[in-house]
Structure formats: structure tokens, C-alpha cells
Image (spheres, rainbow, N blue to C red):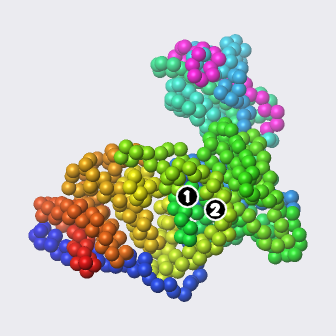
Amino acid sequence: MEMKTNVRLVGVWRVIIISVIVSLIYACSCPDRKILSLSDITPSEHTLLAITPDFSLKVLGDTLNKSYPKLRTGKVFPITGVLCVDGKAYRFMGSDSLRIFSLAPLSNDSIGWEGKYSFLFPGKGWEQKEYDDSLWDEGKGAFGPVKGNYPAHTLWGAENIYVRRHIRVDDKDLLKEHKVYVRYICDDQIKLFCNGRYLLKSGFTNQTKCQRLTDEAINQIVNGDNVLAAYCRNTGGPALLDFGLYIENKTYTDAEPAILKQKDVQATRTQFVFQCGDVELQIDFISSSLSEKWDMTGWPVGLLSYQIRTEREKEHTVKILFDVDTEWMFGKREVNSWVEQGWRFTKSDSLYLAMRTDETRFSYEDNHIILSQKLCSGKEDRGVLLIGYKEGQTLQYGGENLRPFWNNDGAKEVKELMKSVGNRCQELRQESEKLDYKWNDKALQVGGETLAEYILPAYRNFLSSHRFVLSPDDKLFCFGDTLGNVREAYKSFPALLFFNRVDWMKSLLDPVFIYCEGIYWNKKHPPYDIGLYPVSGKQVKLESCAVEAAANMLIMTTAIVEAEQDFGYADMHWSQLILWADYLQKRIKKETFPLEGLLGENDECVKCTLGLEAYRRLIQLKEAYE
């Protein structure tokens, strides 16, 4: 009964796989139609700028001027954008609560601090503000090994320590509408109190931690003397205790959030329109790598295009400003700034920023890069902020170091790419608009709003997580964080098919084919992956995914042949495709699959059937194109 059910399903899945491939190819080759209005795409999260996998900006919903954009790692990119109109500031990008300054600094941020301490239990109420600690020992924080890596000033060698730190606050009103934080580091266990109120309990920390105080805890702070009290226990090995109080630094506290009028997420760009008083500000985020007119594949450059408009003829004094906190990003680093061929460049660590020199000002204050430009409000005026990033690692493949595709000869610099993008910014913007109408129209025609919401943001999402390199034999390779990941490539294929990126589809599969055809792989199925960036040659996932990998490779190869209407690509790897199809055929004959759960997501019977159906389609195409 089970085998009969399996045979029937082969016929069912034959129809399904052919339908899927035909629909995908249709989506990639349907003729141009009358352009419809852009669909209203509002993903919960999407890629603003696809620059490099290490530095691509994402944003949640419509929060561009409510919080900072984030990198793929989850770390924020601390950029603030402000438009000043007639002296009034409007924030259109970022936030204003990232950097903090000390009310009572850690030893690591100062030359130490004075405190009272006891190694013995001092009795009930020791953490209260009113407690009399006049008989306690006096010492300088932090407490721990005085010759260790951390700047401890008072030796702590007992199991327990009780510390009271007196902090003076002269004007509590300064804390209003500000976030207040306690920062600490401990080895091993800590309990922390503020004026007798319990704040937190934590275990061992090998680096400084930061926790925001609740409104109730802040209300406990008074003008005059306040007490931070800590109990810490060391269960063995070196001991360490340091703690302090910090407050957020509101540099742009007078800037009110600009009013968001429109947000439009398309395939190649995201557009925001803000109202800033009498002036309307339009912001476009464009990734240069998505250009089809120029060969910019893998270029680590994004551009933020901005323009202002006003309906009234009244003249306004308008200035746009971008503030990037480099210390938060990289720690304390040297910042270089120079003018080159009409562009003002600024570089910190691996990050490059650039604006045109016309009416542009640069300053570097408290580890903040500030770039500003005067704009004319009597007419439409515009400008651009270029963002570039140079990744530091080189991909190791087959014993060779492969540079990024954009810098294969090692002679190019990020700043040169930025100038090229900047000098074409208007053309890139116009091309981006045309491409977006093209892809939007296709999505609506083929699958309506449902397809548009899925497929349009997927273009930049793919680019933000993949690197392009040139192989030793001059093939374009495309890698995610896990190199040659067959499952991830399979997930990316529908979007790449839709956007006619057959070249990128091949660049995902070529490393897998070459690896399997080499001397290091002797199995009858493809690997799940071929390594973890930046080193290839060692699989990350070793458990069996053989059926899935073999079926996926056959299906993806079939999709490429269908899209190109040419059998050449499959013909180059025909022996491997036969080997994988034979492997699936033996697996499906060998195994008995129960009916229950047959259509599960990871069902091997389904994968075998799909892979074999793709192989049968390849045989038909081989005969048709010969």
C-alpha cells in the first residue's frame, strides 16, 4: 500500500514541478506591460542599503527617524540625520540616545573613584542611603587584582565584599526625559542597589554591562548625596568589582521628529518623504550593485540621495546634517578627512563617507563625524551622501586568497568606486526609478500584491548577505556566510529568477559543481556546504542532507537551462547531474515511505521525486536543444 501511494505521488509531483518551473520562467520572461502605480509595500523589516554583508543597513517598519538603522549582526549604525529649516531642527533619521556620559564613572573611564567597603557582613540595612558607613574602610575603586588587565586600585582577596559609593547630584531636574544607566563588571556574582532600592542581580561578566534604570529607580535619586551599594561574591579565582552611573547624551534634544508623509519600498530603492516645517524632504536609499546599466556587481557603495521642495515662494534657510558616532562603531580611532576631485571624504576604520564639496562643511567633535550642506529652498535642491565600506578579510579558496570581485587585481580603492557612483548619482537614481516600475509591474501582473510584498524586498536582502569574488579560472563566485550552501541557494532562486539574474544563479552553483568535480569530494551526492567564510574546504554542516542537496542542485540546474533556453550549462556538468539523479533513484527504490506526514517540509520522498522530475525535464531539454 505504501509503495502504491508513492507511485501515485510521483505522477502528482511531476505535474507540480513542471508547473513550478513554467511559472517561474514566465515570471522572468513576461513581456513589458502598461505600468501600474507602485504597489504599497510595507515589510516589517527590510534592507535599506546593500553595501557588504559586514555593512548593510536594515530598518524596522517606518522607524527611520525613531531609531538607528541596524547591521545584519544586530548592531546599530549610529547615524543621525537632521534638516534645519530657518533655525528649527527636524530629525529624519536615527535617534538621539546612544552615547552616554558619566554621572559617576567606572574606573575604566577615570582614574578611579572613592568608596567605602567591608569584607564582612555589615548587618541589616547596609544598602540603605541612611546607613552609617563611617567605620567602614575607605578604598579606591575598582576592587580586584591591582596588577591585572582591568584598572583595579584596591585589592580584594576575600570571598565577599560590600561596597558603598556616594554620588552627588546637584540638579535632579537634569535627569528628566533622559535615560539613566548603571554600568558594571563583576567576577563572580553581584547585587546592586540605589539608595536602598534593588536594581539588579547578575553573574560573572567578562566585559562591562549596561542596564537602564526604571522610572521608579530614577525617582529614588535625590538632590545631594546618593548611594550606589553593591554586594559581590567571588567563588574562586581572581575577583573584580566596578560599577558606576551614566546618563544618555542628547546632542540633538531640540530636534523634533520630522513628519513621515510617505514610505515606498521597491526592488532597488527605498524612498521616504518627510515634512519639515514648510519644507518637504525626500530621501532615497539606492544600492549601486543593483545597477544594470553599469557593471557594479559587488561594489561596496551605497548612496543616500536627498532633495527638498517647498510649495511656497518664500525663501528659507535650509541645512542638512549627518552625524555618525565613530566611537560607538569602532572605538576610539583616527579619523581622516580630505578633498578629492570635488568630493569631501571622511574615513574611520573601514567606513568611508563622502559629500560634494559645494557648501559642505566637515567637523569632528567628541568622536562624531559631522557632515553638513547648505541647500537652496527657493527651488528644488538636492544632494547625496555616499557610504562605502571595505571588508578586511580575504576569502581563502582552494589554497588561494580571492579578493572581492570589484578589486580582483588589488589595485582599486573604495574611494574610487565612491567617486564613480557619486558622479553618476542622478543617472543611477533615474535608472533605479525605471527598474522599480519594471519589477513592480511584473510582480503585480504575475502574482499581485502578495508576490510584490515577498519578491521586491528580496532583491536587496539577497545582495546584503552575499559576496562576489572571481575564481582562479575567472568564474564569478557568489557566497553567503556559509560557503556553497545549497539550501540557502535554493531559497534564493525564485527571487533571482524573477529579476533575471541568471549570472548570479550560476555564481551560486559553480563553486559547488567545481568542488564536487575536484579531488576532495568522492561522494555520490553534493555537500550541504563547502565551508564557512572566509575559509572554504571544510564543511560546516556534516549531518546528512544528501537527498535535499542532490534534489536542489538538479532543480536549480533545470531552472537555469529553462531560463537561458540553452543546455550548455547543464552539459558542462552532465556527469555530476547523472550521478546525483542515480543516487536519488536508488534512495527512492531502497526506502519505504509511510503515508502519514508524506508532505512534510523535509520529507525525503518528496525531495527525491522533485529531484528526479527535474532530471527527467533535463533529459527532455537535452534532446530539444541538441
Return the mark for residue 556: none
Which amino acid type corresponds to the residue marked 1 in the rendered image? Trp
Q: Position of residue 504 (x, y in %)?
A: 43, 64
For residue 151, above or below residue 490? above
Q: Quadrant of residue 438?
A: bottom right
Q: Where is residue 469 in the image (x, y as percent from the top left)?
A: 45, 54
Q: What residue lies at 58% left-to-right and 35% top-to-bottom?
A: 209
N-terminal-most mark, 2 or 1: 1
The region drawn magenta spans 147-172
The residue where tag 1 is placed is 299
Residue nearest the observer in this picture, 427 or 84 = 427
Task: Tell me if label 2 and label 1 are in contact, CB under 8 Å.
Answer: yes
Label 1 crowding class (10 Å Cα cut-off): few <14, some 14-19, many 20+?
A: many
Viewed as shown, does residue 369 lie left or right of 535?
right
Mark 2: secondary structure? helix
The residue where tag 2 is placed is 421
Q: Where is residue 381 in the image (x, y as percent from the top left)?
A: 78, 69
Q: Is residue 188 a member of the stretch shown in magenta?
A: no
